[in-house]
């Protein structure tokens, strides 16, 4: 029998980051552990399916002036077509492709879309999509922990804090000094202090913090606010990172990365449950650290333009990004094994589907940044991808030309209230 006990989040974070560091450096960067391969005959069949789906979706995106009932029907048909595609291309079962609907995650996504529109009618679909990604993570964690899958006020507020605060911090109109001052006010709000917001954007941030306080009383749920302070501190450390390049060993880039990603998803878990046991904290923190590494890989080009310091930009500048990416596959397989701890019957199809897709998501992210990787490494990865890379590049160019984006697709799947 496992005996759970509480642990201060700052102490937990230090310990868990060190454990992740040990896993990272124990991984063999010369071995690519991706078991599934796709023969060329299967790739050609999949390419035909992709072309057919995109042509069909483009027609659906062109439909205008639909009344609410027609829009609802259109969304349903789009969802069914995507599920049919997923079954054939990714070898998913009926249970797996229906898991989002059966668990109610699609309904939660719809609810979030409607509430986000009410909270900020000016928020664009790109920002709503950004926030929706966190809602999906929250729903996934609720399912793992066998909690009701629902959009609580706290989860809505935390998901909205992503675009509201990140857009402020990314806005070039504000100086570094102004952003640091905002972060200090943000910290004060998270501690419960009464500090006046300086503009409408800051008022939104404060409103969202109060929404979390409305669900969780500070004296009853200290872990909720400790987790929010932990992600705030991690974000602040990340924001204060020096520009790249820096001399070796001057900055703990890996530790900052693990802290930023780990605390972000840890807060999701705590806000979903109110309190987590130490074992749950470890698994969820590890998942967040891995997710941050994936984000950093996908943001490599923009980070290089901004001279942002990540393990991927650092590796790119010295020419060994292949080894970092290969290590990431090994790292993923190690840390995601922890998900086996969460085992309830209703979550199994969703877990199976997500685990099948991890390698493909990583390969797809690398392909988006292919100019930074060697031809030999890309050729090795291509054998594990359901279509040829040449075809994928062509499809991406067509999508860009036709302005078919993920946030437009989200709008197609969701309907107005």
Image (tube, grey):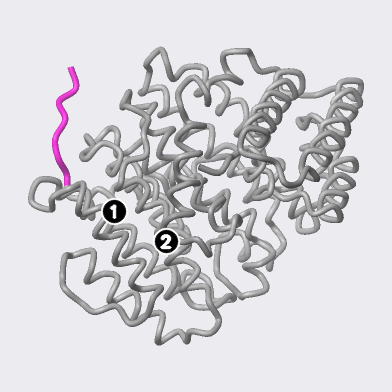
Task: Count up the numbered dots.
Answer: 2
User: In this rendering, is residue 268 above or below 97?
Assistant: below
Observer-nearest residue: 58 or 269?
58
Observer-nearest residue: 214 or 184?
214
Q: Give the range drawn in magenta.
A: 1-7
Q: Does the magenta portion include 346?
A: no
Q: Tell me which residue sits at (78%, 42%) in the image.
A: 63
Quadrant for the N terminus, please: top left
Residue pointed to by mark 1: 14
Crowd around label 2: few <14 · some 14–19 · many ≥20 (10 Å)? some
Crowd around label 1: few <14 · some 14–19 · many ≥20 (10 Å)? few
Left or right, 55 with respect to 248, comes to right
Q: Tell me which residue sits at (53%, 85%) in the image.
A: 173
Q: How far apart are marks 2 and 1 (CA)?
A: 11 Å
Observer-nearest residue: 168 or 377?
168
Magenta highlight: main SS: loop
Left or right, 326 with respect to 266, comes to right
Q: In which quarter of the image is residue 272?
A: top left
Residue pointed to by mark 2: 256
- The kind of secondary structure element at disc 1 is helix
Q: Quadrant of residue 240?
A: bottom left
Question: Residue 347 in the image: x percent, y percent?
Answer: 44, 20
- The kind of secondary structure element at disc 2 is helix
């Amino acid at each position: 029998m496992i005996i759970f006990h509480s642990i201060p989040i700052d102490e937990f974070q230090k310990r868990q980051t060190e454990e992740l560091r040990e896993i990272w450096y124990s991984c063999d960067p010369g071995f690519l552990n991706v078991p599934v391969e796709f023969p060329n005959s299967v790739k050609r069949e999949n390419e035909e399916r992709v072309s057919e789906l995109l042509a069909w979706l483009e027609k659906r995106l062109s439909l205008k002036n639909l009344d609410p009932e027609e829009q609802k029907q259109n969304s349903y048909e789009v969802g069914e077509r995507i599920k049919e595609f997923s079954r054939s291309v990714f070898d998913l079962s009926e249970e797996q492709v229906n898991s989002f609907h059966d668990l109610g995650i699609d309904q939660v996504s719809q609810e979030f879309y409607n509430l986000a529109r009410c909270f900020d009618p000016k928020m664009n679909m790109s920002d709503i999509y950004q926030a929706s990604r966190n809602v999906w993570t929250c729903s996934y964690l609720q399912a793992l922990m066998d909690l009701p899958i629902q959009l609580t006020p706290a989860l809505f507020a935390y998901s909205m804090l992503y675009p509201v605060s990140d857009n402020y911090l990314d806005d070039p109109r504000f100086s570094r000094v102004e952003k640091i001052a905002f972060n200090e006010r943000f910290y004060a709000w998270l501690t419960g202090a009464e500090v006046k917001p300086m503009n409408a954007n800051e008022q939104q941030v404060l409103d969202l913090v109060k929404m979390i306080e409305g669900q969780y009383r500070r004296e009853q749920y200290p872990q909720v606010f400790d987790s929010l302070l932990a992600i705030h501190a991690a974000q602040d450390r990340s924001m204060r990172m020096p520009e790249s390049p820096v001399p070796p060993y001057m900055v703990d880039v890996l530790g900052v990365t693990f802290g930023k990603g780990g605390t972000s998803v840890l807060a999701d878990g705590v806000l979903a449950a109110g309190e987590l046991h130490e074992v749950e904290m470890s698994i969820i923190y590890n998942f967040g650290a891995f997710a941050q590494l994936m984000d950093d890989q996908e943001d490599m080009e923009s980070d290089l333009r901004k001279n942002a310091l990540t393990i991927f930009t650092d590796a790119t500048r010295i020419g060994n990004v292949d080894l970092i990416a290969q290590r990431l596959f090994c790292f993923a397989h190690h840390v995601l094994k922890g998900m086996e701890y969460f085992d309830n019957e209703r979550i199994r199809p969703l877990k199976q589907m997500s685990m099948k897709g991890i390698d493909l998501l990583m390969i797809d992210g690398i392909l988006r940044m292919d100019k930074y990787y060697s031809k030999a490494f890309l050729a090795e990865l291509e054998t594990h991808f359901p279509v040829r890379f040449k075809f994928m590049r062509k499809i991406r160019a067509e999508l860009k030309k036709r302005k078919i984006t993920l946030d437009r697709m989200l709008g197609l799947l969701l309907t107005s209230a």
